[in-house]
Amino acid sequence: MGFQPGDYYDAADMVVWSQTHGFDSFGRLMEALAYLNTTAPIHADLVQEDRHNYVLDGRGSSVLLCGSEAVDLIRSQVIQGSSAALELINCYNRTFIIQRLVKAAQCNFAFVTCWRQLDCCVKVSIAAGAELPEYQTFRMIDVFEPQSLRIFCGTDLEAIETQYAPQLEFGTLVESFSRTEMMDCYKNSVEHGIEIDEALWQTLDDLGARILVESTEGSRAGAGD
């Protein structure tokens, strides 16, 4: 589909991690494929940079394409200082970003990220070194662009919550998805496997058939190039 090797590895990790931890990523993937199958891969543009505050424009693409880019940028800035904030605008499938944050947390980075989901706001927090995040949904009390994602990063979760408290003010808690529930979903996936909807399987099969090359003398001769 035009992804670079590093991009499609990251995208696959995002999808599988999310599905095995209870985030229904296969449903989100179906929506993403409808877009990704009809357009060339689009990466985010850095449109604003102001002393550890950044804005990336996803240009209507999926987090499957620009999520790693966003996390790598904010990590690089935290290495140079104590904390950084980034907003990724015009992007879709934002739940997939959780896997990238969990992976980055293993390198002693802490994160808080939030985005609008219908009339609520999702907040995901993960401490440095933690293997699973805290996932909460709140009532919104602030103006929040529908297709944006905010990421706050540092080395200490409590310090991030304190420093960016004004940007992390939400309404009443609606629901939580606990780490225990995520781990239960993961264990169930390991034990019983991952169920793939027939429609999604057919879509993936069709996409794969488009990429495969018929086995001929010519194709076999070039297989080692």
Image (cartoon, rainbow, N blue to C red):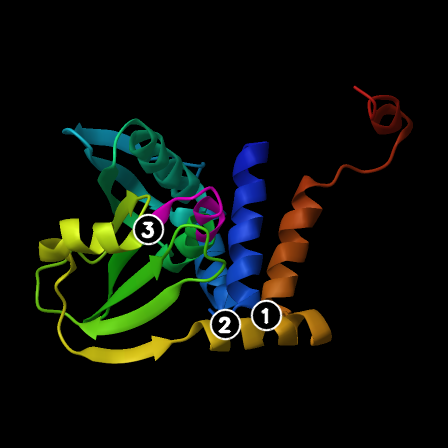
Q: Which residues are magenta?
A: 102-110
Q: Residues within 10 Å of mark 1 (few under 14, many from 20)?
A: many
Q: Which residue is mark 3?
A: 111
Q: Are marks 2 and 1 in contact (CB under 8 Å)?
A: yes
Element on which disc 2 rests: helix
Tell me which label, 2 or 3, sits earlier in the chain: 3
Quarter of the figure with residue 219: top right
Check the image and name the residue furthest to the top: 225
* CA–CA distance in space, label 2 to label 1: 6 Å
Q: Which residue is mark 2?
A: 182
Residue 58 rendering spot, x and y as whole percentages: 30, 41
Residue 72 rendering spot, x and y as whole percentages: 39, 35
Mark drawn on residue 136: none
x 45%, y 44%: residue = 104
Residue 43 rendering spot, x and y as whole percentages: 38, 34
Check the image and name the residue furthest to the right: 217
- Give the number of the mark in front: 1 or 3: 3
Q: Which residue is mark 1?
A: 186
> Identity of the amino acid at label 3?
Phe
Element on which disc 3 rests: strand
* CA–CA distance in space, label 2 to label 3: 18 Å
Q: Are marks 2 and 3 in contact (CB under 8 Å)?
A: no
> Identity of the amino acid at label 2?
Met
Q: Is residue 100 visible?
A: yes
- Whether residue 184 is in magenta: the answer is no
Element on which disc 1 rests: helix
Q: Residues within 10 Å of mark 3 (few under 14, many from 20)?
A: many
x 88%, y 22%: residue = 221
Quadrant, the N terminus: top right
Locate residue 53 relative to residue 200 in the image: left or right.
left
Quarter of the figure with residue 183: bottom right
Q: Nearer the viewer, residue 15 or 43?
A: 15
